[in-house]
Amino acid sequence: MTAYFNGLVLTEAGARPGVAELRLPEVGPGQVRVRVRAAGVCHSDLSMVNGTIRPSFPLVLGHEAAGEVVEVGAHVTRAAVGDHVVLNWQPACRTCWFCEQGEPWLCSTSSGVASLENGVTLDGVPVHVALGLGAFAEQVVAPENAVIKVPPALPLELAALLSCGVLTGAGAVRNTAQVRPGESVVVIGLGGVGLSVVAAARAAGAGQVIAVDVTEAKKSLAEAAGATDFVVSSDTLSKDIRGRTSGRGADHAFECVGRAATIRAAWRATRRGGKVTVVGMGSNDDQVSLSALDIFSSARTLRSSVYGSADFDLEIPRLADDVLTGRLPLDHLITDRITLPEIPEAFDRMSRGEGARSVVTL
Ligand code: APR
Ligand code: ZN
């Protein structure tokens, strides 16, 4: 069955995205159709709008979403009609070199930032979908390996957040940096991703979680997520952090902004031998500079964390369980509930550093 549905389309970088009626292809073998119920507004969506990353256009935005399976194609085994699922923007083929190495988050068959593969059209013309999904839409047709079942008891608006921001943040803590009980942690940038890092670091038993942002307004959100300290970012940040960590610097720093300046700040916030984990996605022309002597003598580790270095098929159900049992509280993450046409205003709030996650409920 061919269907029409509403989705949020961006025609070019810098334009204001608008709702348009899109035509969805028939569900083919191995594909599923999902009725999207909730979709989070993530900074990566904003990065496509403001030109930090450069996708192809026209583009259906959105990639952090959850919903209900309404149709399955031939041979589909992973999901059935009525299942609650989250959408995965980096589905793993399980056969490429990276998947066989046990690194499915780096699967080399990824559809890229914008793809035409889904067969969505607008006025008869093919349109790209963001990260293989285009989830700011009433419905999505995707390959079955792009859906992961979640328990019906989990509210779909929280399920949506698991699929990008929370998996990215919690995975960075658990898998990439492997934070241990008692360690000290600095988190720079307190959006949906950074606040998930704060919550996961506390859940991992971190003794001290120092949350950092440019705006004082993030303090109450940081505390709700479990931060022990809050610091407004300034030129004296590394001194401020040292003052709170026995003069040494923290065991870990997580950069959740996506800028060279904050990667450097994260570097300087850690102790000798500390671990710096870059979670933010920055632009290609923002260069980080560190001296060769500093890199050697500080004995630090600098690593990036893509999609939480996580095997999402295993970790999304685990995170769902953590949320349901209260081990990973996420309620504070949702600060705005909005409709599809209100997404551009959510981008404006995000650009001003206001709130945590805006979630579109459909
Ligand atoms: N120092 C500290 N915090 C900063 C700075 C800075 N120099 N600049 C911006 N911030 C803060 C903002 O005030 C905001 O609270 O970083 C936060 C970013 O949050 P969001 O815009 O909500 O972004 P989020 O969705 O959490 O994503 C963060 O991770 O996955 C990537 O592409 C994503 O790069 C982005 C990052
Ligand atoms: Zn995202």
Image (cartoon, helix red, strand yellow):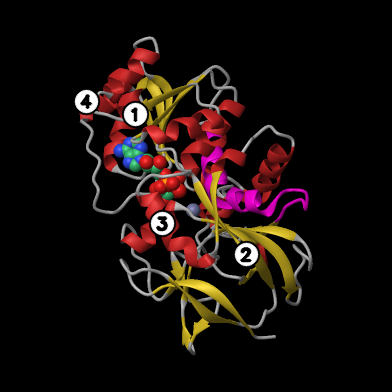
Q: Quadrant of residue 263?
A: top left
Residue type, numbered disc 1: Val
Residue under the image location 77 percent in, 53 percent down: 152
Q: Alpha-carbon distance for marks 4 and 2?
A: 53 Å
Q: Name the residue beneath numbered marker 3.
A: 347
Asked if the beta carbon under badge 4 is closer than 8 A to the nearest atom of ligand 1, the reply is no
Report ligand 1 position as a quadrant.
Answer: top left
Mark 2 lies on a secondary structure that is loop
Q: Name the residue beneath numbered marker 2.
A: 362
Depicted 148 relative to depicted 329: above or below: below
Q: Alpha-carbon distance for marks 3 and 4?
A: 40 Å
Q: Which mark is first along the chain, 2 or 4? A: 4
Residue under the image location 62 percent in, 50 percent down: 312
Q: Quadrant of the C terminus?
A: bottom right
Which residue is at the front of the view, 335 or 240?
A: 335
Magenta: predominant secondary structure element? helix
Q: Alpha-carbon distance for marks 1 and 2?
A: 36 Å
Q: Which mark is first along the chain, 4 or 3? A: 4
Identify the magenta region: 149-173
Q: Name the residue beneath numbered marker 4.
A: 293
Q: Which mark is first along the chain, 2 or 1? A: 1
Residue type, numbered disc 2: Leu
Which residue is at the front of the view, 70 or 119?
A: 70
Magenta stretch containing residue 159, yes or no?
yes
Can you give x and y, in whole percent of width and height, for residue 204 in the image?
A: 60, 27
Can you give x and y, in whole percent of width and height, for residue 13 in the image?
A: 32, 67
Q: Quadrant of residue 59?
A: bottom left
* Callout 3 touching callout 2 (CB < 8 Å): no
Residue under the image location 77 percent in, 61 percent down: 83
Residue type, numbered disc 3: Phe
Residue 355 seen in the figure: yes
